[in-house]
Image (cartoon, helix red, strand yellow):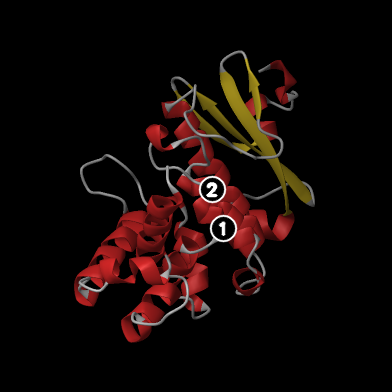
């Protein structure tokens, strides 16, 4: 691909995915940095309202998915995380717009033919963990995002046991056709968010993806106190 085509592609991508770049374009399209002079005329006819509408549709799709069962959005996969962020003053669309311009978002791939990358659920998980502003919104955000991401990932792996996406998830194991991972949570988090009465100060939670479905719950109850190593 020529450098000229790459530049035009990158500018168009920024106009859709980067709300700050798009805002500068509205007021400074004749002279703004980031667009080479030789190609500035290509962007002059762009209608800003249509551009904003397209960006909004993308953000809504990422947040809400579609309604024909084709894809769940972040609202479905991260309900508690997004609810707590919103209570702290971070609206859901604001969070998604910021996510769309992040490096984590750039690492995800929506469809296989665009190359290998993270699923959007893991990209969002990475984005939140890298944001001090979001992590400080609530004392349990870092635990909520771990929990909700683990559920989202195992749901995806149950549907696609041979995934067409990559993952950087620490502790994710594949054995005898089962994907699983474990997370250890403190008593207060388990009681408040997982609605479970633990026997110990820490509880190990298991998330597993199998062809017939998923499992999620305290390890001792799911496996009767036996190690998950036999899976």
The residue lying furthest to the right in this view is: 201
Residue ID at (43%, 57%): 7
Q: Say left or right for 145 vs 16.
A: right
Residue ID at (21%, 76%): 49
Q: Give percent across and percent down for residue 73.
A: 37, 51
Q: Give percent across and percent down for residue 203.
A: 73, 45
Q: Mark 2 highlights which residue?
A: 107
Q: Mark 1 highlights which residue?
A: 103
Residue 119 in view in this figure: yes
Q: Say left or right for 86 vs 142.
A: left
Query: Residues at badges 2 and 1 in contact (C-beta under 8 Å)?
Result: yes
User: Cα distance, mark 2 to mark 1?
Assistant: 7 Å
Secondary structure beneath label 2: loop
Residue 193 in view in this figure: no
The residue lying furthest to the bottom in this view is: 27
Q: Is residue 24 above or below residue 178?
A: below
Q: Is residue 24 above or below residue 161?
A: below
- The quadrant of the rendering that contains the C terminus is top right
Q: Say left or right for 62 vs 85.
A: left
Depth check: 3 or 177 in front?
Answer: 3
Residue ID at (53%, 79%): 88
Depth check: 40 or 122 in front?
Answer: 40
- The quadrant of the rendering that contains the N terminus is top left
Q: Which dot marks residue 88?
A: none
Q: Say left or right for 171 vs 14.
A: right
Q: Give percent across and percent down for residue 155.
A: 46, 35
* Number of numbered labels in the structure image: 2
Secondary structure beneath label 1: helix
Depth check: 65 or 144 in front?
Answer: 65
For disc 1, the neighbor class at 10 Å (few under 14, some 14 to 19, many from 20) is: few
Q: Give percent across and percent down for residue 9.
A: 38, 55
Q: Is residue 156 above or below residue 44?
A: above
């Amino acid at each position: 691909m020529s450098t000229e085509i790459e530049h035009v592609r990158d500018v168009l991508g920024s106009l859709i995915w980067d709300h700050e770049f798009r805002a500068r374009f509205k007021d400074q399209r004749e002279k703004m940095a980031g667009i080479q002079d030789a190609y500035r005329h290509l962007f002059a006819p762009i209608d800003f309202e249509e551009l904003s509408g397209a960006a909004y549709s993308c953000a809504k799709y990422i947040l809400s998915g579609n309604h024909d069962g084709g894809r769940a959005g972040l609202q479905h996969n991260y309900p508690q995380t997004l609810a707590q962020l919103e209570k702290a003053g971070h609206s859901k669309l604001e969070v998604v717009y910021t996510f769309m311009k992040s490096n984590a978002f750039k690492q995800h791939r929506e469809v296989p033919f665009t190359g290998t990358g993270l699923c959007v659920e893991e990209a969002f998980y990475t984005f939140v963990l890298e944001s001090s502003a979001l992590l400080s919104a609530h004392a349990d955000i870092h635990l909520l995002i771990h929990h909700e991401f683990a559920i989202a990932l195992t749901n995806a792996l149950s549907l696609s046991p041979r995934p067409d996406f990559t993952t950087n998830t620490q502790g994710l194991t594949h054995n005898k056709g089962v994907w699983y991972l474990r997370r250890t949570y403190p008593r207060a988090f388990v009681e408040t968010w997982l609605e479970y009465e633990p026997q110990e100060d820490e509880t190990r939670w298991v998330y597993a993806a199998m062809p017939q479905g998923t499992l999620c719950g305290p390890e001792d109850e799911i496996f009767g106190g036996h190690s998950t190593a036999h899976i």
